[in-house]
Amino acid sequence: MSKCHCPICKSDVIPDQWGDCPGCGLDFASVQEPSVNIAEPGNGMELPAPVVLAEKRLGRLTGASWTVNATVRLGRGDSGSRVDIDLSAFPDHAVSRQHATLSAVNGAWQLRDLGSSCGTFLNGERLESESRAVQPGDTLGFGGLLFLVQSTRKQE
């Protein structure tokens, strides 16, 4: 029996048993047109410029940040959940184990909520099941956490 890999977490999936990914909970039925290609280093697809997610608290940057240069899954890294950016260091902010993904899709960044309890927000607007384009200057919210998306390119 052949297996496929989840485009988000790379878990093995048996095609005739598709539903939700056993690794990250991605609803395969929600994955849309085949022209959506998730870019990763080394697969020959165009990656967008890396961005920095910088934590904001009370309107100011705190110094906590992550550079993102490929698709990442954000959430709490407890109870064996597999995340690329572990937000469990911020315990009072209602972040789900599998909260959201920031994906390199067709040369641009896309934010998608993974069914989190307290929501994923782009510039204050809650995402439902759709992916939304993200660019430098945007504010991302995960539960009660806020992050500013910053460019890694030098200003000219």
Image: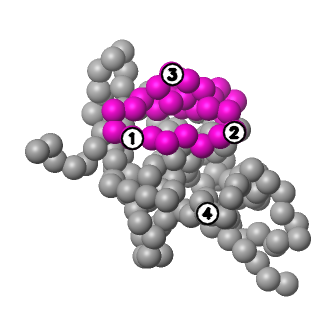
Cα distance between the residues tagged 2 and 3: 16 Å
**Residue type at the position of mark 2:** Ser
Q: Is residue 108 visible?
A: yes
Q: Are marks 1 and 4 in contact (CB under 8 Å)?
A: no
**Residue type at the position of mark 1:** Gln
Residue bearing mark 4 = 35
Q: Position of residue 48 (x, y in %)?
A: 38, 56
**Is 20 on the left or on the right of 47, as rendered?**
right
- Give the position of the C terminus as an image quadrant: top left
Q: Position of residue 45 (x, y in %)?
A: 45, 70
Is residue 82 found inside the magenta-colored segment of the image?
no
Residue in front for this viewpoint, 106 or 74: 106
First of labels 2, 3 by sequence position = 3
Looking at the rendering, which quadrant does residue 127 occupy? top right
**Residue type at the position of mark 4:** Ser
Question: Number of labelled discs?
Answer: 4
> What residue do we see at 22% from left, 49% from top?
153
Q: Which element carries disc 1, helix, strand or loop?
A: loop
Q: Mark 3, mark 1: which one is toward the viewer?
A: 1
Q: Mark 1, mark 4: which one is toward the viewer?
A: 4
Residue bearing mark 2 = 129
Residue in front for this viewpoint, 102 or 33: 33
- Give the position of the N terminus as an image quadrant: bottom right
Which residues are the magenta region? Answer: 116-144
> What residue do we see at 39% from left, 32% from top?
138
Is residue 135 found inside the magenta-colored segment of the image?
yes
Residue in front for this viewpoint, 100 or 29: 29
Q: Which circle marks residue 43 in the picture?
A: none
Residue bearing mark 1 = 135
